Image (cartoon, helix red, strand yellow):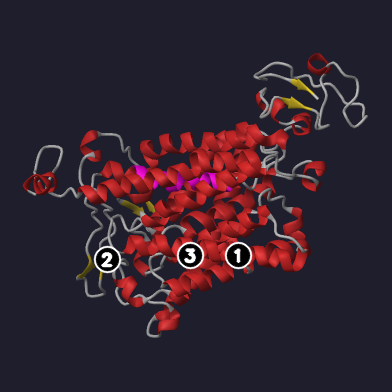
């Protein structure tokens, strides 16, 4: 027994008095879960949910974003989102690379909340683990935001333009939302609730993705009309990693292995399951059969909707949120999308606007209605926070949620537009037509599968036939170099 006690209490240079090994272990585990959502979760999901000719390009856009965000994050991004205040919505950028900074106790310096009379209402957020754990955890959130955004522009965005866009959008758009709502900015101290990123991540990625899709332009007409997934089973594998990884997403948000974390994890899974079942039921009722892709969309909207209030609502409320997240985004995607000229014009490849912007906004507003006062006291900086259904100041809370959503929407439209227009001066945002026709082989010199015979293109230097398996004359590809694997003539 003494040995067990010493393992947790002994003070050494590597175990300072403030370190809680349990909290540190959980935070690193949660960060790894969120990282796995992106790498390889969304890499696999994107590679398999798109048309075969775009599998490599879609996966690479996610892979590149994950790596690029990490370097930008530690160089300057983290402290622009969680550092000392520069403006009410932005912090001062600085590197997060020195050992002195990284092994010190984690701290969000502008999170101290004061009452109107100047007295402290909530102490500064200082988790019981080193800064390195917090920097990495928040990096995984920043990375997945960019990768989710990419889903709107798959199948046509110039990869070089994407490589320029990722660091610029991270620094000039994401960090603003993160500081404003999480890092001690004006929305944080006003009392807006965003438990784990319904606004910072999902509303932002959905609105920015839709804006980017507008400026980049549409896919080829043939791709818009027919864009079947190339591997449904692999798509489910990626979706499963996304779902399971969400336990780290919402379970790590309290910055501790406390009693809020398991409530958040349970509510996350309840809402996702309910949403999936509702979406699937609607598919059966209106289309006569369940859709696997539809089930994945329903799962996603449930996970997104619960995120802004996962640890702050009761589990019956999670079921209600799941019912609404499985139906309202379904209506926006299946009904309103077909009736809206704007939604029809903008080619949002994976419907990120519906699955993230609509679901994220829905979750934020529902949190303003359903946030439970006792749970809010366990977590939030502003005392007496509660949803409108609990009376008191709840009506004002709903208004705060609405105003914060409008700020996030406006900032992402403006910042994304400015960034893309600046990039367009130097790099075309959309691929040239010849690359759009061929796909991965033209863009990367690589193909996802070493098979030929789906009728999309023909290269006599590799296949030796004059017509496709469908009897159509096929134009030869000028791109004959690159990784191919073994070609099987079908």
Chain part drawn in magenta: 136-149
Q: Left or right: 155 with respect to 82?
A: right
Give the label, 2 or 1, closer to the camera.
1
Which residue carries the number 2 mark? 113
Q: Position of residue 21 (x, y in %)?
A: 21, 47
Q: Is residue 147 magenta?
A: yes
In space, the residues marked 2 and 1 are separated at their CA atoms by: 41 Å
Residue in the picture at 51% in, 59% down: 303
Q: Which mark is residue 277?
A: 1
User: Is the residue marked by circle 3 packed among few (<14), some (14-19), or many (20+) residues within 10 Å?
Assistant: many
Q: Is residue 17 magenta?
A: no
Kindly indicate the quadrant of the structure image that contains residue 326. Answer: bottom right
Label 2 residue SS: strand
Residue in the picture at 34% in, 46% down: 29
Label 1 residue SS: helix
Q: Earlier in the sequence, mark 3 or mark 2?
A: 2
Which residue carries the number 3 mark? 270
């Amino acid at each position: 027994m003494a040995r067990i006690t010493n393992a947790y209490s002994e003070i050494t240079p590597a175990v300072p008095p403030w370190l809680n090994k349990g909290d540190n272990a959980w935070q690193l585990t949660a960060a790894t879960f969120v990282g796995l959502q992106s790498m390889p979760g969304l890499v696999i999901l994107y590679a398999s949910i798109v048309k075969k000719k775009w599998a490599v390009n879609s996966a690479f856009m996610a892979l590149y974003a994950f790596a690029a965000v990490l370097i930008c994050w530690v160089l300057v991004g983290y402290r622009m989102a969680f550092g000392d205040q520069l403006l009410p919505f932005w912090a001062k950028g600085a590197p997060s690379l020195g050992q002195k900074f990284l092994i010190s106790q984690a701290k969000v310096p502008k999170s101290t909340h004061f009452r109107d009379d100047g007295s402290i209402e909530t102490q500064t957020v200082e988790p019981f683990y080193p800064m390195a754990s917090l920097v990495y955890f928040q990096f995984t959130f920043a990375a997945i935001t960019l990768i989710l955004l990419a889903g709107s522009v798959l199948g046509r965005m110039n990869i070089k333009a994407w490589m320029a866009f990722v660091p610029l959008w991270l620094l000039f758009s994401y960090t603003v939302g993160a500081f404003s709502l999480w890092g001690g900015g004006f929305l944080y101290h006003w009392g807006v609730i965003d438990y784990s990123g319904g606004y910072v991540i999902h509303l932002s990625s959905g609105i920015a993705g839709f804006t980017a899709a507008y400026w980049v332009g549409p896919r080829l007409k043939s791709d818009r009309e027919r864009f079947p997934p190339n591997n449904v089973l692999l798509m489910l594998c990626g979706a499963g990693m996304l779902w399971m990884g969400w336990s780290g997403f919402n379970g790590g948000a309290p910055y501790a292995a406390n009693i809020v974390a398991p409530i958040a994890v349970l509510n996350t899974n309840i809402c996702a399951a309910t949403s999936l079942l509702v979406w699937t039921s609607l598919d059966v009722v209106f289309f006569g059969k369940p859709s696997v892709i539809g089930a994945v969309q329903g799962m996603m909207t449930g996970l997104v909707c619960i995120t802004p209030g996962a640890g702050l609502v009761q589990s019956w409320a999670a079921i209600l949120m799941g019912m609404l997240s499985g139906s309202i985004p379904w209506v926006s995607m299946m009904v309103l999308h077909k009736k809206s000229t704007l939604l029809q014009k903008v080619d949002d490849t994976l419907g990120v606007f519906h699955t993230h912007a609509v679901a994220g906004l829905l979750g934020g507003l529902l949190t303003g209605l359903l946030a439970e006062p006792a749970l809010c006291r366990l977590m939030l900086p502003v005392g007496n926070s509660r949803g409108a259904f609990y009376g008191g100041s709840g009506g004002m809370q709903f208004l705060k949620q609405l105003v914060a959503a409008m700020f996030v929407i406006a900032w992402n439209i403006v910042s994304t537009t400015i960034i893309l227009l600046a990039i367009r001066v130097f790099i075309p945002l959309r691929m040239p037509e010849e690359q759009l026709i061929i796909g991965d082989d033209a863009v990367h010199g690589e193909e996802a599968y070493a098979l030929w015979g789906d009728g999309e293109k023909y290269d006599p230097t590799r296949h030796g036939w004059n017509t496709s398996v469908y009897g159509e004359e096929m134009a030869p590809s000028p791109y004959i170099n690159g990784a191919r694997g073994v070609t099987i003539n079908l």
